[in-house]
Amino acid sequence: MSEKQANNPLHGVTLEQIVKSLVEYYGWEELGQRIDIRCFNSDPSVKSSLKFLRKTPWARTKVEELYIATQKSVWVKK
């Protein structure tokens, strides 16, 4: 089981950390353009985003996929 988790790029990362990292990297405006959901485009906040993403699996998946892609591109640039 630990082998499976070792290959999971989201292991040990909370949804809140993911959202804050994406907001820091992209900002709310660009994040809302990349993932067109109301909680990113209309009066955005981490709290409202977390509430929506925890209830909406397809949106959470998109956010997690963007986070993974962003982390890969950040590592390539270093």
Image (spheres, rainbow, N blue to C red):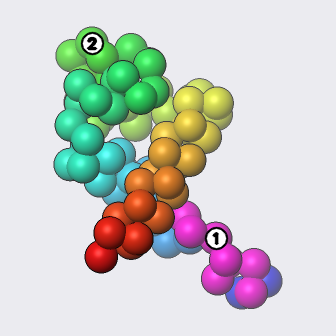
Q: Label 1 amino acid?
A: Asn
Count neighbours of disc 2 (C-alpha within 10 A) and say few if under 14, some if 14 to 19, many if 20 or more: few
Residue for badge 1: 8
Compared with 29, 2 (above or below) is below
Q: Position of residue 44 (x, y in %)?
A: 24, 24
Compared with 38, 64 (above or below) is below
Picture quarter containing residue 31?
A: top left
Q: Label 2 amino acid?
A: Ser
Q: Which residues are magenta?
A: 3-10
Q: Position of residue 47 (x, y in %)?
A: 29, 35
Q: Secondary structure at mark 2?
A: loop
Compared with 16, 38 (above or below) is above
Tell me what residue is drawn at x 34 percent, y 56 percent: 17
Q: Is 8 in the magenta?
A: yes
Residue for badge 2: 42
Compared with 76, 63 (above or below) is above
Q: Is residue 48 visible?
A: no
Q: Is 78 in the magenta?
A: no
* Residue 41 horizontal side relative to residue 58, left or right: left
**Image mark count:** 2
